[in-house]
Image (tube, rainbow, N blue to C red):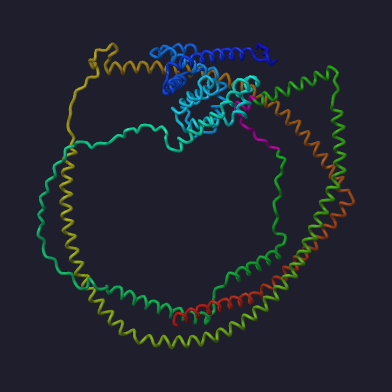
Amino acid sequence: MSFISSPVGLSIPGRTVCSLISQCVSFAYINSLFLGFSSGFKMASNYASLVKEAVQLLDKFRASRQCLDDFTEDAMKDLQDMDMLQRKFILDVVSGCVEQKKLLDVVINAFFGQHVKSVSRGERSQFVVICYLATFLLDDLGLQCFSSIVKSLDIKKMHMFLGFFFSNLTTWIQDEWNNIYDSAFVAKQWIGPLLRWRPEIDILMDQLAVKISQGNLLKKAATKTTEPQEFALTEPKPRPLPMPELIPQQKKCKPVPSSTYKAPKEKQIIEENKQKNHQKAQELLYEANIKQFRCGNPQKSEHTKRVMSKIEEDLDSRLKPNSFHSRGAPSSNKAVSYPIKLNNAAILRKEALYKRWVEEEVQRIERLVQGERDPSSFLQWQKEMREKDLQEQLPKIERRHLEACISEQEAALARKRIMERNQKAAQLKKEETAQLMQRYAEKRLQEEKEIKDLVQQVADGHKNSKAAKEKLQKLKQSIVKEVSEQNQELLHQALEEAEAEMSRKFEVIREIHSIESLPRMKFKKFDDTDTVGHELLGEMSLYETKERLAHLKNKQQAEQEEKRKLILEEKQKQKQQLMEKLDAINFHSSVLAQATAIRKEERKAEKELIQQVVAQDETVLALKKMLEEKKQERQKLKQTESKVKGHEQTGGHTGTHSQASVKSWEELEQSLSRLVENFS
């Protein structure tokens, strides 16, 4: 980019200077244009119409698709009917807005960002033209022409835009313009003239505000709304009334009996039966509560059976202490190894594995031949050192294990002593509570005898009124039985008549269905050797089609047999190769099995040697002896405890029986209290 030095001493880009020169030329031309134009247009409305025409052209212009020169030539052809000065003014305004788009977009984009709801995007070109006229042509137009243009548009939006533009002119608008052009040039050419016009613009904005307050706004013509009209449809004729159906004369029915509106006697009978059953249930409950302790219960309770089974188990265990011998754990070293059937993939994998092992062994032998050192001596030394460390660590591990076992036995003995102490305290508490409950049960038995006498007196008074009620009930039952028999006879007759009518209708329907289901006989002769007769090139009869299909099927079967034979031969070859590979795998696996058996024997000998070393340690022997003593002490405590339990269980059965009797007395008390409440 080339730079040109200005007279002020600033460096300005060459492109910027060219645009400024063209702009100055357009300003001079427009100035001369307006000097002659003002003489030809005396009415202010001409300015407004020209500005609106420029706004329409600016809306049509698309910078991404059209060139400015081509667009102005096309617009000049469309504006041939206008005067030359008018046409020049419109085209110069449009071209100036396009050339200064970067400068004008700073103001317009910010204005639309702040007033999104009150301004539409379709009015953008209108604000661009007003901003261009105010910034570049206000000195040439004059305030009168500019105010007439502004007043011809929407006053409210113009007032909003001018207030936004002139209030932010010296702040961020000037800073944004300085980023595009030189700051001194911006201040001299645009900011200074606009600030000189600021008082007159304020007066114009006051006038616009007055007009807005008075309501002299431009109103759009009211659009005519669509008025719906009814369809001219012919009115339908009223339908004639249908002929009334003849009502068949029916036989006079019998009058409704008076018993229909009375409550049925069955309800009363049911209520009486309920009362009787309730009274019987109360009597049976009373007798069961009184007589339940007069005879002993021959069956043994579950608790007794459980205690007896425990005693029998203890006796059996004492008589046969060594009768149970557990089976030893199965040996982990199984000599028999059953063959495993391998599939093709497993055979190939094993073959690749053995090949890799053979290659590694060959490479190792080659390295040894070339003079490389054999690591077997180092591995042998490493193995000996590990065995030595293991012999030192095993006695320590065995000592720790025995110490843990001894501490576990001591903790078990301590828990057993605490449990015995708690059981003794609980047994004393149970005996005290059993004595208290026995005394309370005797007291409640005396009270219940007194209540029984009172209930017996009340029951004797109720028995006298039962005989009269039973006679009345039998009389009512006989009357109800006669009425129900008559109703059943009438219902039976009506049901027989309805069934006869229904069977007749079903017979008619069955006859109609049988007639409709008769097949219609159609005969048509068909010859499979004749063609249809459509006169097509490939037309053939059904017989010929079957013959050709059969021939084609035989041909396909022959091809399939050939392919099957080739596949079988290929499979046989693959099977032979796999068998050879399987023999090689079996040979390798047998060699490896021999090597693993030798290694197992060596490990077994090492373990036996280590166990001998551990068994000869003095501390380990002392700890084992201590552990045996603790186990014997715990076994003695268990035997003494089992003997004590046997004696306690034989005597404790009576205690449990007393507890059961106390519980039964409580249930008896609750039942008697409910009985007294019901009678009260």
Q: Residue 535 at what x, y percent from top left?
A: 24, 12
* Quarter occupied by residue 152: top left
Is 319 displayed left or right of 77 in the figure?
right
The vertical placement of 587 against 403, above or below, is above
Which residue is found at the position 70% from the left and 39% from the top?
334
In the rendered structure, which segment of residues is drawn in magenta?
Answer: 335-348
Q: Residue 187 at what x, y percent from top left?
A: 63, 22
* Quarter occupied by residue 477: bottom left
Comparing 296 with 676, the one in front is 676
The vertical placement of 254 against 9, above or below, is below
Which quadrant, please, contains the C terminus? bottom left
Q: Residue furthest right?
A: 618
Which quadrant, please, contains the N terminus? top right
The reply to whether the magenta stretch includes residue 277 is: no
Which residue is found at the position 48% from the left and 86% from the top?
452
- Is residue 229 visible in this depiction of the protein? yes
Q: Residue 157 at what x, y percent from top left?
A: 48, 32
